[in-house]
Image: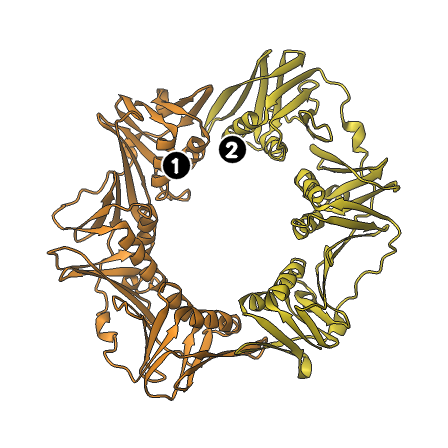
Chain colours: A orange, B yellow
Amino acid sequence: MEFKINQVEFSNAVTEVSRAVSGKATIPILTGIKIEAKENALSLVGRNNDIVIEKVIPVSEKVEIVKNGSIVVSARLLNELIKKLPSDLHVMVTNNHSVKILAGEIVTTINGVDAEEFPTLPELNLSKRFTITGKELINIVKHTVFAASKNETKPVLTGIQFTLQHDTLTSVATNSQRLSLIKHSVHTELNESFILPSKALTEIGKLFHDYSSEIQVFITNTTIMFQANHLTVYSKLIDGNYPSVLSLIPQESKTTITLQTKDLLDAINRASIFASESRNNTINLQLTDQSKLVISSNSSSIGGIQETLNVKDFSGDMELSVTVDGRYMKDALGVIDLEEIMLSFNGAFKPILIHPVGHYSNLQLISPVRA
Amino acid sequence: MEFKINQVEFSNAVTEVSRAVSGKATIPILTGIKIEAKENALSLVGRNNDIVIEKVIPVSEKVEIVKNGSIVVSARLLNELIKKLPSDLHVMVTNNHSVKILAGEIVTTINGVDAEEFPTLPELNLSKRFTITGKELINIVKHTVFAASKNETKPVLTGIQFTLQHDTLTSVATNSQRLSLIKHSVHTELNESFILPSKALTEIGKLFHDYSSEIQVFITNTTIMFQANHLTVYSKLIDGNYPSVLSLIPQESKTTITLQTKDLLDAINRASIFASESRNNTINLQLTDQSKLVISSNSSSIGGIQETLNVKDFSGDMELSVTVDGRYMKDALGVIDLEEIMLSFNGAFKPILIHPVGHYSNLQLISPVRA
């Protein structure tokens, strides 16, 4: 194998595929990046148990393939080194899987490993396909990942459920105590549902975060593949039945109030200072009359806080006192960019429904806790 | 105790004195800040085993003292809370050392502790005094702290030695393998030497980092005090005899070369990738002829690197090969802002002397290691 490449081009590609590589991989070869020089392109692959990333760099004035071949080299070492090299690089495999990199007056040698031992890429049936934008993908990550369960005892809840139906992509995550859902319009004939591990979705979001162009998504029963600008990311899907969460969303409410998002978030952040002393981070929300919401939290060991917010709009019952886990409330409000939110209540022990006002494609549910 | 204060003013002061407070202090009261309302000013004190910080806020349109008194409250809690409060604050001590803070519609209560139990400030004889600028202080921190020893078996070497003599302040740190020294002009009649703990100096540098004004420094046999803009910081001095390091600095050299600082630092950074695999981070410097310096590092497990730098000026012996600890070389070059450096050698086993070209008030020494 032998090729010449612009340093910036190579460094960026190495950094991208390195995202999938863990220095602690149990199989030593998986701490490496597979580099393959083909007729028309250079390919880099990094992988872990969750995702596989392939970056293809087509031959151009920045890349010249001198001799085909492949090698696996330590991702950490390559990443650290290439960043620190100047100008143009000349890379070749010499004896015994040794990789020589020439850059001006700098000669580097790295011990590599035979690429034959590196797992091959998944082979997918590409018939089921839809398209989303980078911006939509980021939006899905932001609105779902935080709400997924961290508890591995119910594996499906550690993933994000995606449902394609009627030209709509519905993404939802829940840990049984809170739920977050967001809908996007997509053009598709598909009628499918699948569960993607939340860790993989987070990584995929980071990888495509500055891709303004469209991302092709291919799905099979076991695997999902995201593809844009010569970058391909594979992830396994989680096998299992996701609970039918849509039935949990209340269609009516006893009390509905509208508030400034920032006012409520600021109040919750302050109350959380005291709530963090209790096991469930308990914060109490109490509606006192048609225009006031009292937010309070108390800890016998450190003290307490109580503040009063103005409610903008109001409908339904006036009497209400609900106790929530402050962390869930913070997370929920933290992802809402819009100025106003609507909170809908069905009594002290029923989930609170949260909508950004005017954007009903996004909703969140939070179950109350015992005070 | 009762006072009214602008939130930003109070938050900044709490943040400043909190720097000295550790949440893990073994004496519980030292996890707190002492707040004292006096006739003409509000005083805040935070402390740990290394330093004591006092911030005084004189009465102004931003601070009004309603009733004298004092209290101790958790630094962590106060710091977290005050940052998150809006507008103007009204603070008062109620029953049982309870502190009530009113801010608009927000009522907060914090459990405090009797200030009688808080240690008093050191009382100093203020006869020995000199003045430095904030910029000089930062410069001293930058050029000395990294070179001090982390090993507590020789306590004096964990400190920075300061010497006042002939209108010059000489600051020096060494861990026996490397040394860094910087001189500043000061106007003083003093002829004194003292050792300040490097941890304390680091904190003091951070506290005064944006003080462009002059800092008054007072010294006694056991304590040092820095004072500027109503901020006072006390630190204990380290008792003991500092080694007479000036005699270690070679007055002559067999070989002297001049290089671009950045070129050498870049080369050392690259070589460090491989050097970090060896116990002493060994990097070899070899002078091949009058205009080339070869920098190399090799590891049998991961590979190796070799590169050639152009030497700008040269004098003395041509034959030279020295092996150094790459981390010491990186640290030394990292603090030099000037474009060119001069390296002076006295053979393979004698310390290397490093000067920024044209600025001989700063010098560093690095002892070679065995390859």
The residue nearer to you, when weighing B240 against B219, is B219
Q: Is residue A322 visible?
A: yes
Q: Which residue lies under the disc numbered 2?
A: B277
Which amino acid type corresponds to the residue marked 2 in the rendered image? Glu
Q: Amino acid at mark 1?
A: Ala
- In the picture, the disc for residue A75 is 1
| Residue A345 rendering spot, x and y as whole percentages | 33, 81
User: Residue sitting at 34 percent across and 85 percent down?
Assistant: A347
Q: Quadrant of residue B164?
A: top right
In this rendering, the answer to whether B338 lies above or below B58 is: above
Residue B277 image point, x, y percent: 51, 33
Q: Secondary structure at mark 1?
A: helix
Quadrant of the snapshot with the N terminus of chain B: bottom right
- Residue B24 visible: no
Residue B287 position (above or below residue A352): above
Label 2, label 1: how many angstroms apart (C-alpha)?
16 Å
Q: Position of residue A173 (x, y in %)?
A: 29, 64
Are discs 2 and 1 less than 8 Å apart at CB?
A: no
Q: Position of residue B208 (x, y in %)?
A: 68, 51
Report the side of A82 relative to B114 (left or right): left
Disc 1 crowd, CA 10 A, few/some/many (<14, 14-19, 20+): many
Q: Residue A300's quadrant in the figure?
A: bottom right
